[in-house]
Image (cartoon, rainbow, N blue to C red):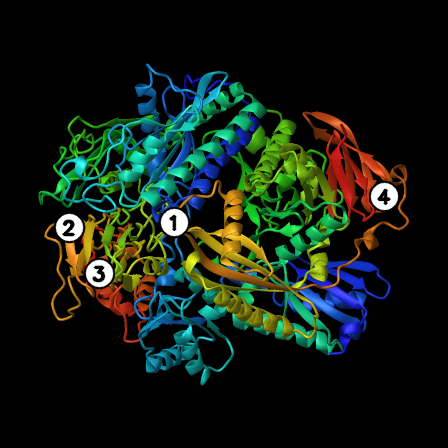
Amino acid sequence: MTSANARFVIGIDVGGTFTDLFFLDRTTGTVTTGKLPSTVADQSIGLVDGISRELDDFSDIATIVHGTTVGTNALLERKGTRTGLITTAGFEDVLEMRRRDRPHTWGLRGGYEPVIPRNLRIGVGGRVLANGSIETPLDEAAVSDAARRLLDAGCEGLCISFINSYANPEQERRAAELVREFWPNDHITVAADILPEIREFERLSTATLNAYLQPRMAHYLNQLAARTHDRGGDSDILIVQSNGGVMSIDAASAQPVRTALSGPAAGVIAASHIGQSAGFENVITCDMGGTSFDVSVIADGKTALAAQTSIDFGMVVRTPMIEITTIGAGGGSIAWIDGAGLLQIGPQSAGSDPGPVCYGLGNDQPTVTDANLLLGRINADRPIGGKLDRLDVEAASAAIKTVIAEPLGIDVMDAAEAVIQVANARMAGAIRIVSIERGHDPAKFAAMPFGGGGALHIGALIREVGLNTGLVPRYPGVTSALGCVIADMRHDTVRTVNMPLASVDEAQLGSWIDDLYAASSARIASGSETFDNLEEAIEADMLYAGQTHTVQVRLGGRADLTRTRLAAAFAGAYRTQIGAPLEGIPVRLVNLRLAVIARRDKLDLSVMAPVDGCSTAAARTGTRQIYADAQWQTAGIYDRLALGVGERVTGPALLEQADTTIFVDPGLFGEVDAFGNLRIERAD
Amino acid sequence: MNKASGPSGGTGISPVQLAVLRGRLEQIADEMDATLFRSAFNPIIAEAHDASHGLYDAETGETLVQGKEGLPIFVGVMAFAVRYVIDLTRDDPPKDGDVYIFNDPYEGGTHLSDFKLVRPLFRNGKVFCYLASVGHWHDVAGNVPGNYNPAATESFQEGVHIPPVKLFGAGVRQDDILSILRTNSRLPLSVYGDLNAQVSALDLGHGRLNALLDEYGDDTISAVFAELRARAHLQMQAHISALPDGDVAATDYLDNDGIKDEALPIAVDVHVDGERMVLDFSRSAAQCAGPVNISRSTAIAACYVALKHLFPDVPANAGVLDPVEIIIPDQSLLSATAPKPVGGYTETILRIIDVIFTAIGKLDPSRALANAYGTINALSLAGHRDDGSRWVMFSFFGGGHGGHSDGDGLSHGNAPISMATIPPLEILESAYPVAFRRWSLRPDSGGAGQHRGGLGAVYEVEVLANGADGFFFGERGRHAPQPVGAGKPAALNRFSYRADKQDDTAPETPPMTSKQVGIKLQRGGSVRLETPGGGGYGDPLLRAPAAVAADVRLGYVSTEVARTMYGVALGADGAVDDAGTAALRADMRPETSGQE
């Protein structure tokens, strides 16, 4: 690989609607952005098109870093490959039985269809006990026979998952070895290799979803590599993982389940870097899409990771992921009055097709976007996204009047403002969950919107939750693509220990960490880039004997990994996360987790600052009547990208740019910082 | 506090403020739930979420706001628990910083395992409202570890009784009370841990609600409480009005009370007239000797749960029951008084929910849910490890949900009264000397129907230690979960065991079918549980033959049942035999009935 010295690093985020590109020219230090519609059938077509709009010669590309929704969509739409399961006899249904839950607290409706149907799940003899001992040897003939039956049934992918394999993976590995002799492809997932952690359903679900995605993801990544190669490129291609780190194509092909939240994770990484550059170690990201509002917290410069998430009911993925809290309140969320006469927003959404009433594509239920339009916060003549020429204000007004204003007995403008207030309240609730509920003081946080819709609501949110600042990046629409450019290489591993801390052997502890390190660094080395300095972060999941939920204990590096230090770190973490530590109860070490991180070069964000920025007065393009605080007011309209560094705009004001509109509420002001961000704060 | 005078509320609160503050208040209750789940010691709370939190009226104890993740049955029952504290403290009013603790099952509802903590929140020297936390403790003494004692004839055999006493007096923990609680459990550390976690949850709720009151003012929040209640009342009335007027009845049975092998009827007569509904349980059994009695407060809470499932959009507060009259005579199985045993209350309330579902299904099939599996199946295995240490494995097991107007029932769901998840078998195997031999779906256990009932499960677990005592408390061993319309009932519950590892003898079953104490198991002995699915919805002959063929291919339904229940004939390749199916179905349809 010779491209490491080439000019461009390109970040590419492919979402459901748009493909966003972010080009960093390393020789000049300049950046360029691009946006084009996604090619849904094969994302790599739009991706390569997007690059060629800016570059003729693909050999100028050093690295392509890609945030992808191929995995997410395949899971949500159940469009993975036909996959079989070989598991311990008697436990074939664990995947379908889940943890004996249900989709909704009330109603007893709703079903569940596992990604591997019952007739493609085959049990074989062999049993490992909880202590790792082998009670019954593996029935090797049955394994081969099961695999042949699954092949005959048309399976392309295969998952092998046995009970207690976290404690001893020998039988799983032996089974895989047997099957590999004749399985026609590499798409075999061994559960303990994906997640050697106690809890059979969570491990099986994660491994199964991996197997289900593997052929499709491998095919896609091959296509992508081939398409760039055809254009003369031989760049490194890296894929963003749900944990916010990137991995090689080979690693992504083997463990595609780690890409389940690839796109949003890249956005959070960008937000963290933008925030830190602008002087904010504490940031809450707000991504408002058509159907949902996603928030994530960055505290002291660190992104919060969740150990597990559900992609959909019963589709559990347990690998570290950027913790994203989602509520069903996006621009397309429908406003309605429930049977008790309460104004509600969502979870039903008009999405982007048919979309809000004002799109004129057939929906007649008012949405958040319709309310924003009516209130003057969206320019009817300049719809974002470029799909439509004009938005239909009259239709939006009529819908809000019939559905909201008349039942509540209020004026239509007040009804529109009520819709926004209730939507804001729901979004504020999501922010409270990740801030106040986690013990963070909101006054120390900046809220950063990305995606198209969030910047209209950011002012209201900082007021409602008591946040310090709103920080709108220069190009909110391409934040995830920017995140791709700066994300670090990362690989996470876990080992279940599950023993009293007092009986953990310290030398053994060190050798476990060595094993995890070897596995992770091998994954990182599977890309063509080489890294001199690998960082490691060790965490332990610990609890008091008798508890079942563990506390996440950060241990930093491997120096001084003693029982005493673990005990002290646990007590500290318990105090922060739960409350006063308990006396006289033994502590258990359940899991050891290791993240190995290879830092990639960081982009100097001062290149984002406007170069020939003009004064506030010169950037003013006109005025518009807006409705806020129950009255009509005149808001200045500004060309956001024209504003120079240090320029200040007083609310009410609307700042327009191609990929978003920013609303500075009355009582707030916005100021352009040295990185091109708009800082929004209270005027008092 | 302001009280709603009627459905209109008339509190002057704006619709926007109402929507905003409802969210804030629910978030406080949800956060209390989350705090307890995260830090509880016993898996019944931590994993199974057998706990609940809410805010309750200062004068009546009625539910104001309830967390969404806790156990649904507690939503209704905690109001009675708070009311009990209010009544008992009339002469000695609570002080700021007091926390009452108790487990009285008659006034406070449910059973002795559920410890309730009640804390007043003071504003300007007066009680503004109560916060309460309830959680199911792992062991509270009594004859049976884990406290599901099917042989109890007095509640004294079920566990320790604690009347409302102050765990905290004006903010100071009373360690003598703590000491009594710890002493009266086989698992004192677990009790201590859970109690601490419940106290933390109340602390958190207290702080959050105070902050909200400071922000918005006490009067505004009072007005929101009143308005939410009025609106739940209104919405419930609207749902009842949409039902056809008339009288319907449903009767179902508990297998027995564990003492006397005699079926116990649970019957409801439903009367709907405009926007009022009467649920009359007068035809139900009288209170019995064994532990399937429930107190009146528990019965009313069960009605609340059933109605919330049928009308899930109504806000969770006391207003749900305002337009509903519930008639339960004294001395009924559903209004038991001390010291009648109540440990198996889950079975009885599940049957109350079943008969309400069945009755409403007769009135309006479009609303209908067929019965879910209808038993909690409490299994306790206890003994000593080879190193002499004591172990108690206690868990509840799952089954199928009923077919419903929108589709098939969910397989292996949790009980309607609960959002409990089942502990992973790997966690159980790592904590106790047991090995599971089977953990699978149970074919043919879902009731046949146009929309099939979900499947129950088969669990089999072997003892790896030197002997264990088994205790089992279930139901539906003789009376199957009921369908809607022409659907079919689900399979019966079946419990069996082998005292030791002999595979050539037939397994034993309890003489009372679904309940037994003191089963002696040797090393290698095992118990097996086959749980019911859910009832079917609508005529199985209306189920698409292709859907039946798919059920057979996936092993949910046997070829035989496809033929005898659904009238679907399949070829050797598993595809539908159209001619054979038409012939079977023609034979099975009664002359008089055509298409539904």
Quadrant position of residue A45? bottom right
Which amino acid, by three-letter code, is at mark 1?
A: Glu
- Element assignment for label 2: strand
Q: Chain of mark 3?
A: B
Which one is in front, A43 or B334?
Answer: B334
Q: Position of residue B102 (x, y in %)?
A: 31, 31
Which amino acid, by three-letter code, is at mark 4?
A: Leu
Q: Find disc 2 in the rendering and name its residue.
A: B516
Which one is in front, B81 or B567?
Answer: B81
**Of labels 3 and 2, the one closer to you:** 2
Q: Which residue is rendered at x = 67% and y = 41% of the image?
A: A445
Dot 1 alpha-carbon crowd within 10 angstroms: few under 14, some 14 to 19, many 20 or more = many
Spatial distance from mark 2 to mark 1, Cα to Cα?
26 Å
Q: Are marks 3 and 1 in contact (CB under 8 Å)?
A: no
- Element assignment for label 1: loop
Quadrant for the N terminus of chain A, please: bottom right
Dot 3 alpha-carbon crowd within 10 angstroms: few under 14, some 14 to 19, many 20 or more = few
Q: Are marks 3 and 1 on the same chain?
A: yes
Q: Position of residue A37 (x, y in %)?
A: 69, 59
